[in-house]
Amino acid sequence: MAFSYLVFSNKHELGNAAAAHAAGALNRAITERGLARILAATGASQFEFLAALTSRDDVDWARVEMFHLDEYVGIPPTHPASFQRYLMERLIEPTGITRYHMLDGDKDPREVCRRVGAEIQSAPIDCAFVGIGENGHLAFNDPPADFDTSEPYIVVELDEACRRQQVGEGWFRTFDDVPSRAISISISQIVASREIVCVVPDLRKAEAVRNCLEGPVSPMAPASILQTHSNTTVYLDTASASLLPRDAA
C-alpha cells in the first residue's frame, strides 16, 4: 500500500474504477469489523463516481456509517448548493444508508464542529472519498491550509478561487451569493483515515493535480498532503492528468 495515481480515458471509466475500489474497501471493513465508516465528498467532480458506487449491488449499506466532509455556513439543507441536500440525493437515498452525520450549515458552526467531531473521533474512518479543488483545496481547506490543527472539524474562510469554482460549477448564480465561511473536516482528520480514494476528473483541475501530486508537500497546495499517506489512490482522467509527466502514472 502506498500513495499512487491512476489515469483513465474519461470520467465515466474513472468513476467505475474508483467505485469498484471503494466498494472493495467498504466490504473489507464490513468483513473485518462489521461496519464501514466513510467520509463522503461532494461537488460536480464526484457525480460519475457516486452514480457508479450507488448502482453497485455488492455493498451492505446497512453496515455503512457516513460522515459529511464540509458545508457552507448559513446555507439551509433546502438550498440547491447545500451539500447535505447533495448527499441525501446522491448517496443516502439511493443506498438507504441509515447511519449518517450531517454538518448543518444553519446551526452554530462551532457547536456543529464539536458535535460531529466527537462522533467522528469515536472510531477510525475506514475509507475517505475526497476530491481536489481547482485551487488545490482538500475538503474546504483552502491555501494556506492548516496542517497542524488536531481538531476534527474547523470553521474556515473560503478564498476567492474556491468561491469562483462554486459559481463555475453552477451551484450559485453570482460570486456574491457564495458564502464566505464553511465548516470543513480538517487535514489531520482526513489523513487519519485508513484508506483514501481521491476522485479528480476534468481539465479545470489539471494545474491543481500537477501542483498537488508532483510538487512539494505544502499548505499552499493543500491536497499535496495526500503524498504522505500510505494508502491513497488518486483517480484521474486524461484531462486532469494532462500536465503530469507522461511516464509518471
Image (cartoon, grey):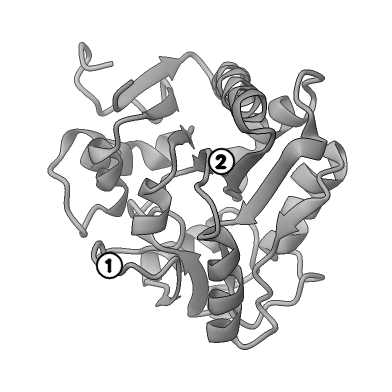
Task: Give the Cα separation between the discs numbered 2 and 1.
Answer: 24 Å
Q: Which mark is residue 239?
A: none
Quadrant (top left, top right, bottom left, bottom right) of the C terminus? top left
Which image quadrant: the N terminus? Answer: top left
Q: Is residue 62 left or right of residue 15?
A: right
Q: Position of residue 37 (x, y in %)?
A: 61, 44
Q: Is residue 123 above or below residue 38?
A: below
Q: Nearer the viewer, residue 71 or 159?
A: 71
What residue is disc 2 on? 45
Residue 95, percent from left and from top: 83, 37
Confirm whether residue 179 shows in the render.
yes
* Any part of residue 133 in sight: no
Q: Quadrant of residue 161?
A: bottom left
What's the residue type where badge 1 is placed? Asp
Apparent side of residue 240 relative to residue 215 in the rendered image (left or right): right
- Residue in the picture at 22% in, 42% down: 211
List x then y, in percent, for residue 210: 25, 36
Residue labelled with disc 1: 146
Residue drawn 51% across the image and 42% down it: 128
Compare marks 2 and 1 and give the one earlier in the sequence: 2
> Which of the two marks, 2 or 1, is nearer to us in this view?
1
Find numbered disc 2 in the image and state the secondary structure of the residue it sits on: helix
Give the residue displayed 39% in from the left and 70% down from the top.
151
Rendered residue at 43%/26% (across/down): 236
